Image (spheres, grey):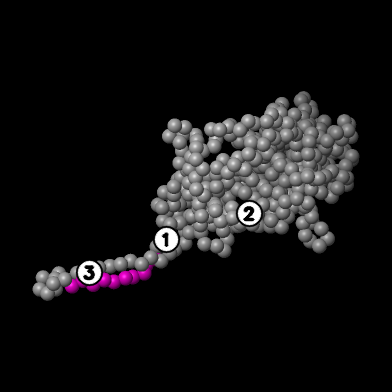
């Protein structure tokens, strides 16, 4: 409660050549909430039917009520009681309030439903209604009934804007379909603004920070767009627990890690992730000294010692050493309070790996002050002394160089 509102259907550009594609993109995210693809008959049939229902609802609600329909309206259309489905199909077959493309899609989808056997038609209808049941929650319905902003405002508004999508951990699975719809619309809409010269025309740059990135399931468009989103002024900051979690969602042959210019890792708890980090660190050469003694010569003539040196290769960091990277040190009196930063590995494309120190924001007075700034519509937050460590640690050489570069 107390949230700003966003209606995904307001992003459907009805009356234009984009309306069918926009409706299909939303329908695909709703029917496939886990990103596993439209693999079976019911999913494919439900996708086509829901696309038609979205366009039909958008046009009829605008005609009858003079407003933009929302997903709860689509749910209401598909859950009409009694003989509602037969009446709905008859209305959709005769639908003629949209563009030629919208009319043809709605008419053909309704005719296909009428031609299905009763049991099959009921299965397709039930599949679509189940996927829309999330939007019967009154809080969700209220927050997606209209839009307080448009996605284009994030990069092309008068001023740069910040948007926070905050989901309680207990509701992540339940709200995954809605999050997927929003992120899918975001990726498609903000990477369409291209000028006549082929260059992006977005006014502002944007940081897309996704904590627990894999919690929304597989977003194929995100995996594809990661390679070229920088050309549109978008930078992605993805956070996952370990690489095994990422591979579990996107598969072992995913391109997510390969398209990240900078990768940062802390001490992993997973052996498989530790082995990957060890391979990413590469190899190094060490000099091994050897000393041998000739016992017979030692007994007859005194000491006969031979020293030798050899160069051997070894991992720069072994998997075991990766797992033993120093973590942040916490206060003995208050285990929730960090008093010293831990180590981290930094991999930047084309550069040697870096063993660095975590740049904790609450050790930096400026960043701490910024973190306590009140959001719009929220009460001011009073700074807490408990968040500030007793003594400021000496910055690592890396941090010192970064600060010096920032001053210059």
| Marks 1 and 3, how far apart at CA | 27 Å
Identify the image quadrant of the N terminus. Answer: top right
The CA span between labels 1 and 2 is 36 Å
Which residue: 77% across, 56% down? 200
- In the rendered image, residue 243, in percent from the top left (x then y), is placed at 52, 50
Q: Give whichever of 400, 256 is nearer the camera.
A: 400
Camera-nearest residue between 185 and 395: 395
> How far from the left and from the top, in percent, is residue 102?
84, 44
101, above or below 119, in the image: below
Residue in view at x 89 percent, y 39 percent: 97
Q: Which mark is residue 292?
A: 3
Query: Which mark identifies residue 407?
Result: 2
Label 1 vs 2, first from the N-terminus: 1
- Relative depth, front residue between 350 and 17: 350
Q: Is residue 120 visible?
A: no
Place residue 294 in its image quadrant: bottom left
Which residue position is annotated with label 1? 315
Instruction: State the image coordinates of residue 242 (x, y, percent, origin top left).
Output: 51, 47
Q: Nearer the viewer, mark 3 or mark 2?
A: 2
Label 3, residues with CA under 10 Å away: few <14, some 14-19, many ≥20: few
Quarter of the figure with residue 308: bottom left
Q: Secondary structure at mark 3?
A: strand
- Is 312 one of the magenta-colored residues? yes
Q: Which of the two discs, 3 and 2, labels the residue nearer the N terminus?
A: 3
CA neighbours of label 1 inside 10 A, class few (<14), some (14 to 19), many (20+):
some
Q: Which residues are magenta?
A: 304-313
């Amino acid at each position: 409660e107390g949230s700003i509102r966003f209606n995904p259907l307001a992003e459907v550009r009805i009356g234009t050549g984009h309306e069918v594609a926009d409706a299909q993109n939303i329908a695909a995210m709703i029917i496939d909430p886990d990103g596993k693809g439209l693999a079976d008959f019911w999913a494919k049939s439900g996708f086509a039917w829901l696309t038609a229902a979205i366009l039909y609802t958008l046009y009829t609600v605008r005609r009858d009520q003079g407003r933009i329909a929302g997903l709860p309206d689509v749910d209401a259309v598909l859950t009409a009681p009694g003989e509602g489905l037969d009446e709905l199909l008859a209305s959709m077959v005769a639908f003629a309030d949209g563009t030629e493309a919208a009319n043809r899609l709605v008419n053909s989808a309704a005719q296909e439903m009428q031609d299905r056997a009763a049991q099959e038609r009921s299965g397709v209808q039930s599949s679509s209604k189940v996927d829309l049941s999330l939007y019967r929650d009154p809080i969700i319905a209220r927050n997606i009934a209209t839009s307080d902003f448009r996605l284009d405002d994030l990069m092309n508004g008068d001023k740069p804007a910040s948007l926070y999508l905050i989901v309680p951990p207990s509701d992540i699975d339940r709200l995954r379909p809605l999050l997927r719809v929003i992120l899918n619309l975001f990726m498609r809409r903000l990477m369409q603004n291209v000028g006549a010269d082929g260059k992006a025309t977005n006014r502002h740059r944007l940081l897309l920070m996704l904590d627990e990135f894999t919690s929304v399931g597989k977003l194929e468009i995100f995996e594809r767009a990661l390679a070229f989103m920088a050309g549109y002024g978008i930078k992605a900051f993805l956070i996952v627990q370990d690489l095994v979690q990422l591979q579990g969602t996107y598969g072992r042959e995913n391109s997510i890690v390969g398209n990240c210019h900078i990768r940062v890792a802390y001490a992993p708890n997973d052996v498989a992730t530790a082995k990957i980090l060890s391979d990413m660190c590469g190899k190094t050469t060490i000099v091994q000294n050897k000393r041998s003694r000739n016992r017979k010569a030692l007994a007859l003539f005194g000491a006969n010692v031979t020293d030798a040196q050899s160069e051997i290769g070894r991992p720069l960091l072994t998997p075991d050493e990766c797992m033993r990277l120093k973590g942040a040190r916490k206060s003995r009196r208050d285990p929730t309070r960090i008093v010293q930063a831990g180590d981290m590995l930094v991999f930047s494309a084309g550069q040697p790996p870096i063993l660095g120190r975590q740049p904790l924001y609450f050790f930096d007075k400026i960043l701490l002050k910024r973190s306590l700034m009140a959001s719009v519509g929220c009460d001011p937050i009073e700074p807490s002394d408990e968040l500030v460590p007793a003594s400021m640690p000496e910055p690592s050489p890396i941090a010192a160089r970064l600060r010096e570069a920032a001053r210059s």
